[in-house]
């Protein structure tokens, strides 16, 4: 291959199929149209093209999205102005199969000279059918480069609507590079291995190999002999195991009808390999080529295969499709007269990974509902929200002669045993109204607020967590965060979970036991919960609170019978059973209450009342030292972390590269390439 | 052999340099061993010897930055140069595919950066939630936050 440096970039001249696909690094830039290009370059080359009097047959221009044509003379030499226009001419093919850009099957274009007016003539000639991309639209495409098996994704003209566009639409639009992906296969991967891998693993375009949204979308016209031109919409990805040695060339396409792009006609894996699985050696290898097309029709379960030979390209051979199952395809490969290379056992390490779903949408964890039943509903416990005066009156009453029920005193040592608990709690429990305060069913004559529910919810409000740097410094482990929760204590939080979000603290409180659970929500989803106790017990007897509760519950069955009998005189078996069930209900309520696992809750109960009553976050942020002098010196002379792929001209300012790939070039000495790579890796100014 | 003498004020590691032609001369190559490091002899440049720091050798189609200038006589200077691969191949380099490790304009600062220095005296910031357990009650019937007595007694109504 001969390469020429011109004021429009590097131009390569070589043989057609034996040459490498030119990487886009050698794209000709600044060319307005094919004819202008020809005129500009003709004096530069020691070849004459196109030769006068030769009939140049357009057999494909299928990549109209890239507007590529190629001129080829009968000697096999070619001129390729990539991203420009080339016209395919295969002298040995008299009845071309693919006629694109509106050229019907068998049509030809005579080009005595390859100047712009010829192209114009051609375009005008086929304008009724031509589909030329709208240059103002963008799409994405995927490309493969010879070394390193890089998948290249970038922007390209997008065709979103069929139509006839002016010749200017053929002008080249520069692409913008976006993402590099490391290839999936090592050098030397054989066609058989790839084939087995793809089909045995059910790889489709939705697999991690490619993301369908990032694939090329070309429009092109397929013409089948005897039928009208049909327009298809192609999504393409390309794989090569070793392009530089021209071993195997794979590409995957999904075809959809252009009039209904959502309707995918089929998915197709193509492979181009030499018959003997050897490497291509020359242009002539094209005629040794067999192309195996594996059609995976979405509307059929079977896989179709179309086989044709480069020696005998006919319109119909492309569509000689035989349907076989996948297993038959693999096992019966020999019937295609091609030996499937055996996949060698790989001793040692296994390959794998990278085929995850990449779906990182999780579920929002909502606040749990309040238990639907509680101790209040059992009839064994009544909770009041008295005032201090009401409590004083109650105490006086219980120790007075007015309260002298002999039957109760047989069960309780003193009247205060009827008090399950008296406590101070930092919330106002919801009440159902003001009623007479009753102890063990006996009225005291004291009117008091009655609590309606054992559980209540308290929100401490929301705060926004701003990204103070909007860099990695905002996140763990550089930034640390703790939250202080009243009645619970300080707890660590993962900054990554709340950074840039709206954080809320919600308490669930058990009025009876004082247990509380604090939920931390980020954007309304629970990310953490901590437990504590917010009750401050007021002693009413020498018996501690817990034993009182347990005592009440343990004697519930007996007491209820007695109390009920004493009150109503209707003690009986049925009541006892009911009491037992009621006791179970109380126990169940204890179980319903949040399972509290205290994590170092050093701020619970009485000490909690004396501590801060408002939750707060404690942040420890790093302080970045960033030199600035007449601007951001760090950014200008060191640069910020990038890990972004592109061509050098995509970047500005100071650039340090982690990976560089320079195509071997006849003009550059090898040591110069090394020096360029070294400089790019040590830092250059673009 | 034509040798163009240039002046540039750009950094050596700049790809797209701004160069100003000072003079176009003819000279002779001395001891050519490779095209990356050359020694050329030029006469008649004594008066502009401080005016250029960069040369282009047409025969090699390469730009060189000057590493040394030796005055051999009143007329002849010996210029040592090393090829400036960045400028010479700027078109190729500009279209070379790379993965940027660091850059001034295209970056992602969410990538941890070992080059970022941090002071030992960190920021310590508190952020308080709007509501607490001792500040919200607006009335005795406010069920949000207000200290209350809770009396639990045996039995129902």
Image (spheres, rainbow, N blue to C red):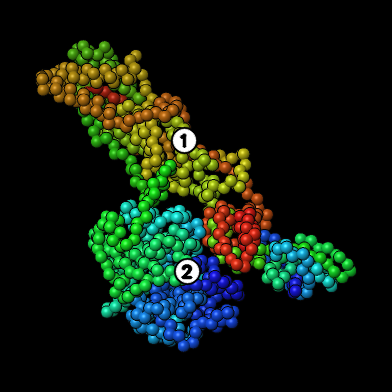
The quadrant the C terminus of chain A occupies is bottom right
To which chain does the residue with label 1 belong? Answer: A
Q: Position of residue A270 (x, y in %)?
A: 36, 64
The image quadrant of residue A311 is bottom left
Is there a contact, CB below 8 Å, between mark 2 and mark 1? no
* Residue sitting at x 45%, y 31%: A489
**Which numbered circle lies on residue A245?**
none
Give the residue number, with chain letter if any, for mark 1.
A492
The image quadrant of residue A255 is bottom left
Give the residue number, with chain letter if any, for mark 2.
A282
* Residue sitting at x 31%, y 39%: A368
Give the camera-side residue of B87 and A162: B87
Indicate whether A219 appears above or below A276: below
* Residue sitting at x 49%, y 48%: A466
The image quadrant of residue A193 is bottom left
Indicate whether B154 appears above or below A675: above
> What distance separates the C-alpha of mark 2 from that of mark 1?
67 Å
- Disc 2 or 1, which lies upstream in sequence? 2
Q: Is residue A215 left or right of residue A300?
A: right
């Amino acid at each position: 291959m001969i390469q020429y440096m011109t004021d429009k970039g590097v131009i390569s001249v070589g043989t057609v199929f034996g040459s490498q696909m030119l990487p886009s690094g050698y794209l000709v830039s600044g060319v307005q149209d094919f004819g202008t290009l020809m005129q500009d370059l003709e004096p530069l080359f020691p070849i004459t093209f196109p030769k006068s009097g030769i009939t140049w047959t357009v057999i494909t221009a299928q990549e109209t999205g890239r507007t590529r044509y190629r001129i080829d003379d009968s000697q096999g030499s070619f001129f390729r102005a990539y991203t420009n226009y080339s016209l395919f001419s295969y002298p040995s093919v008299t009845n071309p199969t693919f006629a694109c850009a509106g050229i019907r099957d068998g049509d030809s274009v005579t080009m005595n000279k390859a100047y712009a007016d010829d192209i114009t003539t051609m375009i005008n000639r086929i304008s009724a059918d031509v589909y030329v991309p709208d240059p103002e639209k963008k799409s994405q495409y995927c490309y493969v480069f010879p070394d390193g098996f890089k998948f290249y994704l970038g922007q390209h003209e997008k065709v979103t609507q069929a139509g006839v566009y002016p010749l200017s639409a053929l002008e080249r639009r520069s692409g913008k590079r976006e993402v590099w992906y490391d290839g999936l296969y090592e050098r030397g991967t054989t066609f058989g291995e790839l084939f087995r891998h793809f089909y045995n693993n059910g790889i489709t375009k939705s697999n991690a190999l490619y993301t369908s949204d990032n694939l090329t979308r070309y429009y092109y016209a397929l013409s089948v002999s005897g039928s009208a031109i049909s327009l298809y919409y192609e999504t393409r990805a390309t794989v090569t195991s070793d392009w530089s040695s021209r071993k195997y060339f794979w590409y995957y396409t999904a075809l959809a009808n252009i009039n209904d792009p959502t309707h995918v006609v089929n998915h197709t894996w193509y492979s181009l390999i030499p018959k003997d699985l050897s490497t291509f050696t020359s242009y002539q290898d094209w005629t040794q080529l067999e192309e195996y097309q594996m059609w995976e029709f979405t509307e059929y379960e079977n896989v179709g295969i179309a086989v044709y030979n480069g020696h005998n390209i006919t319109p119909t051979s492309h569509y000689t499709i035989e349907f076989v199952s996948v297993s038959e395809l693999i096992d019966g490969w020999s019937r295609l007269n091609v030996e499937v290379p055996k996949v060698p056992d790989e001793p040692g390490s296994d390959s794998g990974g990278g085929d995850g779903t990449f779906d990182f949408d999780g579920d929002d964890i909502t606040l749990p509902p309040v238990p639907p039943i509680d101790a209040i509903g059992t009839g064994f416990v009544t909770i009041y929200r008295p005032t201090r005066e009401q409590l004083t009156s109650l105490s006086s009453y219980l120790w007075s002669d007015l309260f002298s029920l002999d039957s109760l005193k047989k069960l309780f040592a003193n009247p205060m045993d009827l008090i399950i608990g008296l406590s101070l709690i930092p919330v106002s429990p919801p009440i159902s109204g003001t009623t007479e305060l009753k102890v063990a069913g006996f009225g005291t004559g004291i009117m008091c607020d009655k609590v309606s529910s054992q559980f209540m919810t308290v929100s401490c409000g929301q705060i926004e967590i701003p990204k103070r740097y909007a860099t990695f410094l905002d996140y763990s482990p550089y930034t640390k965060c703790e939250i202080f929760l009243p009645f619970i204590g300080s707890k660590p939080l993962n900054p990554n979970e709340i950074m840039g979000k709206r954080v809320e603290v919600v308490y669930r409180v058990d009025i009876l036991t004082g247990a509380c659970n604090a939920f931390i929500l980020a954007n309304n989803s629970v990310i953490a919960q901590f437990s504590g106790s917010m009750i401050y017990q007021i002693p009413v007897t020498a018996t501690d609170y817990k034993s009182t509760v347990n005592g009440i519950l343990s004697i519930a069955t007996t007491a209820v019978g007695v109390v009920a009998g004493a009150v109503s005189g209707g003690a009986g078996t049925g009541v006892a059973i009911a009491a037992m069930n009621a006791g179970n209900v109380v126990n169940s309520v204890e179980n319903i209450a949040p399972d509290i696992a205290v994590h170092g809750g050093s701020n619970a109960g009485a000490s909690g009342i004396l501590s801060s009553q408002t939750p707060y976050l404690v942040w420890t942020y790093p302080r970045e030292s960033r030199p600035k002098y007449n601007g951001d010196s760090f950014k200008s002379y060191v640069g910020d972390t990038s890990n972004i792929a592109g061509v050098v001209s995509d970047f500005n300012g100071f650039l340090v590269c982690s990976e560089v790939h320079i195509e071997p070039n006849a003009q550059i000495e090898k040591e110069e390439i090394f020096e360029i790579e070294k400089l790019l890796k040590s830092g250059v100014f673009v | 052999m034509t040798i163009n003498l240039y002046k540039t004020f750009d950094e050596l590691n700049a790809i797209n340099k701004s160069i100003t032609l000072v003079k176009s001369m003819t000279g002779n190559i001395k001891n050519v061993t490779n095209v990356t490091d050359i020694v050329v002899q030029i006469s008649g440049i004594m008066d502009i010897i401080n005016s250029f720091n960069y040369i282009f050798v047409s025969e090699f189609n390469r730009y060189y930055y000057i590493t040394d200038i030796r005055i051999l006589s009143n007329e002849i200077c010996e210029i040592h140069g090393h090829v400036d691969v960045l400028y010479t191949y700027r078109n190729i380099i500009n279209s070379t595919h790379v993965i940027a490790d660091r850059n001034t304009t295209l970056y992602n600062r969410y990538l941890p950066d070992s080059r970022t220095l941090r002071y030992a005296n960190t920021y310590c910031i508190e952020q308080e939630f709007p509501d607490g357990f001792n500040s919200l009650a607006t009335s005795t019937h406010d069920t949000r936050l207000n200290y209350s007595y809770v009396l639990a007694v045996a039995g129902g109504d």
